[in-house]
Amino acid sequence: MKNIPYKKIYTTIVATIFISCGTVKNEQIETIKVDIKSEKSEIEFADYFSKKNVVVLETNENSTFSYIDRLFLFDNKIFIFDRKLNSVFVFSNNGSFLFKINNIGHGPNEYQGLVDFTIDEKNNNIILHSHRPYALYVYKLDGSFVKKVKLNDIYKNIASIDNKLLFLNADQKKEHLLFDYDMRKNEKKMGSLEMNDLDKQFAFHGIIAPYLTKDKNIHLCLPYSETIYEQNGKGVEAKYHIDFGNEKMPEDIYKSKKNFRELIEFGRSSNYGWGISNFRENKDYITFYYQLCNLVIYSKKDKKAKIVLSVLNDDMIYGSYIAHDGDDNNLVMQCPAYIFKKQMGIYKQNGKWEKLPDNIKKIDNSIKDTNNPLLLIYTFK
């Protein structure tokens, strides 16, 4: 089983019974206590962040995407995966559109459908995972094609670290959740994390946000578990336990619900702690959602978690958090263009418009409701 009993905030040695896998190491695990009965906080920008950047993603007939299924910041570029459009869109860090990968077809180096993508930061490669056919498509950072690697299976998510890919299994019949893949040898290795009943029950149900995210290391975050796993290049280990105390979702509820829609409705109406997603770690902070939409910022220094309603800032722009990939010290939020325009319209009516910076006013004058979303990139202190 992956769920770990309640603990106070402290670091302890994990007993073997709490780790159900073949190759997961029994290392130290830290417990993050989240009091969901406490009031959500409007935090001051200056208390957590040193700088901010509002990025307007260029919108034209080639750069328009429908949804951000995964966002990667790397090499001063912004990489956005849109599963519906089977494409990866690439922008400069100031939002200028550079190119997209959209090789849909039946040719030798083309695909019909994509599941996920990642970036091999060590070798500067973009890696696309296709389910039609089962394959990996490797490109350089400028979008030039490198090679196609055939696969025998389909996976939910992929992530890259130290010349290896980590695959998240999507097959109920397999014994393990995670599989290593050596890109240098084109070889899949032994799996880790034995699948339990909940893994199999929700193998084909879940959330849109990736379960695997990559910062300095790779983290696995399952919405029906309170344990966060880490792949740090040396192996997989249970790294963090999210402790909701008495408000933790009862395990029998998971078993009784047929799909995630029922879980979402029950979990929110009962205000249970569950649905951990968008997990991301940097040097001093950990950020994640619970109930799939409530943001938590955890200070690794103070050992305190705060449930965040909004970040107060002079730009007066608010967005929804998204756990991006990339080894940096940023927190990223996205704000749909129509929401931004609506906010600006309210500010014009209530007298706050004059207080806004000129660059925000210029953005309002230059974009339409149908534009790509804006990205709010905050850098932690």
Image: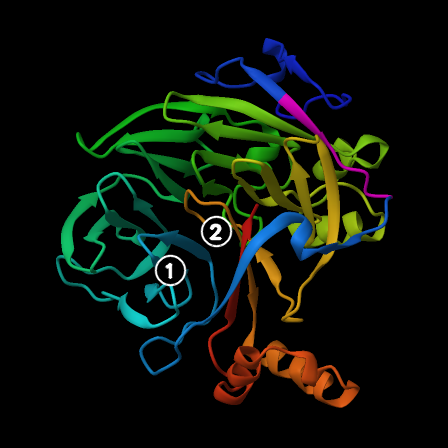
Q: Which residue is drawn at 57% across and 45% down?
A: 381
- What's the mark number on residue 78? 1
- In the image, the segment drawn in magenta is 30-37
For marks 2 and 1, give the CA distance: 10 Å
The amino acid at mark 2 is His
Seen from the viewer's position, the closer of residues 156 and 106 is: 156
Depth check: 28 or 139 in front? 28
Q: Which mark is residue 324?
A: 2
Side (left or right) of 177 relative to 124: right
Q: Where is residue 75 in the image (x, y as percent from the top left)?
A: 30, 52
The amino acid sitting under disc 1 is: Ile
Q: Which of 200 and 82 is in front in this view?
A: 82
**Image x and y of residue 318, in percent:** 65, 67
Magenta span has 133? no
Residue in the picture at 22% in, 51% down: 137
Q: Is residue 259 in view from this perspective?
A: no
SS assignment at label 2: loop
